[in-house]
Amino acid sequence: MKTMKEKNKEKTVLITGASNGFGMEFAKLFAQDGYNLILVARTTERLRKLGYYLQDHHQLQHVCIITADLTRPESPQEVYQEVKDSGLEVDILINNAGAGVHGLFYETDLQREKAIIQLNITTPVELTKLFLHDMKRRNSGKILNLASLVSFMPSPLMAVYGATKAFVLSFSEALSNELKDTGITVTALCPGASNTMFFRRAGAAHTRAAHGTLSEPAEVAKDGYDALMHGETRIISGLKNKLQATSSNFMPDTALAANMHYLMEEEQEEDRSTSPPESML
């Protein structure tokens, strides 16, 4: 009789944004349990180093590297076709790739925000549509979408990013309900502010939120992994973040927005001598 790890060697997981942060930690977790990997990101060299290391270290049967800029509208179909051409079936889809931009909406760059909407919303929707058809045919599969703690509240100074994450949470929970009588599950992972490259890439490295208490990517990924395997619809990573998400149900949106605005402002000199409020990202 096969062990669980031996059974996993017959399964494949596709992870977007796999070259760093949560995506890289997800890749490590799945490799540790014997899954074949399809790693997708823009940085080929980083992906190859990670993929070859995990394949060698865990004796994986297949590691497929796909270099793709998921802000391009054509990319989801291209990724899907490359998977089909490889002869692999995706048993688990991890829509992890995402980005944000910091600043007042009327001052930020529209083209960059259109790319963020493509990356955070359109690409995961299209990848989910494409691979879900295959999962439905087999009546088996798991999907995890990366939402956020800001899915629950307005996000001044990151208005587009927050709105995209609200979409991801709503979309995931709706799909979970649609598929409840099938062998397919959909999970939304909602982390708070974390120690990844997100703040730096978003131009928010000097904000109060970026200098608050940050979650570690490995811990967030493990929470998401466990929730995915148990078929949970939603997981808020970290006790502090769970409490904040719960409190958002009782606070008026104006108060939530004011708090988020404060956290997303650049840290002032006087902030360093006081304890800042807990982050809500």
Image (tube, rainbow, N blue to C red):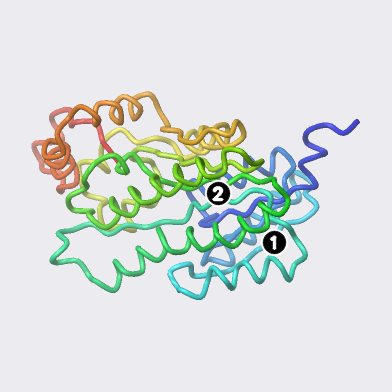
Look at 75% across and 67% down and name the residue there. Answer: 86
Q: Which residue is mark 2?
A: 24
Q: Which residue is mark 1?
A: 64
Look at 39% across and 52% down and name the residue there. Answer: 197
Is the residue marked by circle 1 packed among few (<14), some (14-19), or many (20+) residues within 10 Å?
Answer: many
Instruction: Give left or right: position of 275 versus 20.
Output: left
Q: Amino acid at mark 1?
A: Cys
Q: Position of residue 17 (x, y in %)?
A: 51, 57
Q: Position of residue 272 (x, y in %)?
A: 15, 35
Q: Residue furthest right?
A: 1
Q: Position of residue 16 (x, y in %)?
A: 54, 57
Q: Amino acid at mark 2?
A: Met
Q: Which part of the image, by quadrant, shows the N terminus?
A: top right
In this rendering, is residue 281 above or below 94?
above
Observer-nearest of 128 and 66: 128
Q: CA distance from mark 1 to mark 2?
A: 14 Å
Observer-nearest of 95 and 107: 95
Which-is-in-front pick, marks 1 and 2?
Answer: 1
Cβ atoms at labels 1 and 2 below 8 Å apart: no
